[in-house]
Image: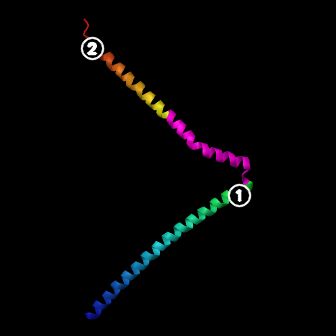
Amino acid sequence: MDNETDYTKQLKTDNKNLEAELQKKQSELRVYDRVNFYYSQDEVMFVYYSNQEKYSMPMSIMYLVIFLVLPFTFHVISRFLYKLFFMILQLFNNGNAAYLYSRVPSDQK
């Protein structure tokens, strides 16, 4: 009976050690998988940006200007749309108020 207890204790200890080792390997695998993914993305971007003969200088300058001007255009457009939204909202409110006032019964007889 004592021999059986030693065997189960040893088995539990081995299972715990094996589980800890599996967790460690899975964690390392996740880290290395993420590093490999980032490395492959870096290689793709490096090839894309270092291939100068594919993109002419005027095209590159045009892309640069577009990306520099783009945030300001979004700002101008959003300000215009914001004012337009409030103007439309005001028209709806004024229209509803005019409709409600026309429905109020008058005291004239």
Under mark 1, the amino acid is Asn
Please, is residue 16 above or below residue 64 in the view? below
Q: Nearer the viewer, residue 99 or 89?
A: 89
Circle on res. 99: none
Please, is residue 107 above or below residue 32 in the view? above
- Residue at image x 53%, y 39%? 75
Please, is residue 95 above or below residue 17 in the view? above
The residue at which mark 2 appears reads as 105
Compute the Cα span from label 2 to label 1. 77 Å
Q: Name the side, left or right, on which 102 lies relative to 57.
A: left
By secondary structure, the bulk of the magenta-drawn segment is best described as helix
Under mark 2, the amino acid is Pro
Badge 1, how many Cα within 10 Å: few under 14, some, many 20+? Answer: few
Asked if the residue at tag 1 contacts the one at tag 2, i.e. Cβ–Cβ closer than 8 Å, the answer is no
Quadrant in the picture for the N terminus: bottom left
| Magenta span contains residue 74 | yes
- Residue at image x 66%, y 47%? 63
